[in-house]
Each structure stands twice: as structure tokens, then as C-alpha cells.
Image (spheres, grey):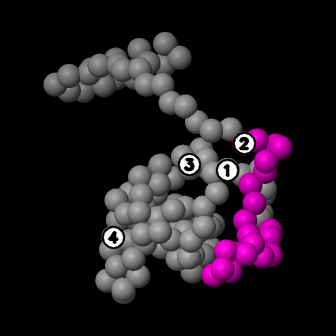
Amino acid sequence: MAALTQDIRGALSRQKLDHVWTDTHYVGLQFPDPAHPNTLHWVDEAGKVGEQLSLEDPDVYCPYSAIGNVTGELVYAHYGRPEDLQDLRARGVDPAGRLLLVRVGVISFAQKVSAPGQKEGVGLGTRGSDCQ
């Protein structure tokens, strides 16, 4: 890793940038718990848990998500970009307190989770790019 860092720093330095430096960041991510696999259920308005919905791969998880259970209305939010959330608001749909279903792609998962407005939602799910 150190050799790669030196190579990249050297390449950037040769580009005559004002300042090139290295920095260290430590990131803690969640790991799936086989004893408590991810699940998705329909919940009625009274809060009664209904049908369990099948997941394409129950071992899939999002390391950017919070731990725990969330409940909310499901809203499709295209790619989850700030302009997509603004479009929802313009149509009279506030993402606050809702589960947002977004398409994969265009922006990173980290951007989808941290986009302004996403923090208003209580959860975020993704769907392959075939979602219309």
C-alpha cells in the first residue's frame, strides 16, 4: 500500500499541483450478523407485521445504514440525488419519515445515504438499474 501511495503522490506532484499530501482515515463499517439476517416485511397502518418479502440475496447489506428496524411509507426516489428529492417535494411528496427506494448507479451508495433530504427518510433501499 505504501508503494502505491508513493506512486500516486509522485504522479500528482509531477502535475505541478499547489499542494499534494497524504492523509489517513479510519472508517468503521457494520458487518452482517448471520444470527439476525436482513428481512423485509409489509406492515399495515396499525403496525401489524404482515407478509415477509423475499430478498434477492438476504446476505446483502449496506454498510452505510444505521443498525435497527425502521418502518415508514415506501416512496420511489429515482437515483436518490438531491434533485430527485426536490422533484418529490415539488410533487407534494415529502421524503421525511419515509422509506426511500432508489435506483443503483449515477451516484455512490455513500452519496445516496448522505444526500440532503436522505437523512429525513428513515430508511433507504436500492433496486437494480432496471427499475423504471
Q: Main secondary structure of the magenta part?
A: loop
Give the camera-side residue of 95 and 77. 95
- Mark 2 to mark 4 CA distance (whole Å): 32 Å
Residue 41, label in figure: none
Determine crowd level at label 2: few under 14, some 14-19, many 20+ residues with C-alpha closer than 10 A: some
Classify mark 3: helix, strand or loop: loop
Location of residue 88 with respect to 103 vertically, above or below: below
Which residue does the numbered mark 2 point to in the structure image? Answer: 32
Report x, y in % for residue 130: 62, 73
Residue 83, label in figure: 4
Give the camera-side residue of 14 and 58. 58
- Mark nearest the camera among 2 and 4 is 2
User: Any magenta on residue 36?
Assistant: yes
Q: Are marks 3 and 1 in contact (CB under 8 Å)?
A: no
Determine crowd level at label 4: few under 14, some 14-19, many 20+ residues with C-alpha closer than 10 A: some
Type of the residue with mark 3: Ala
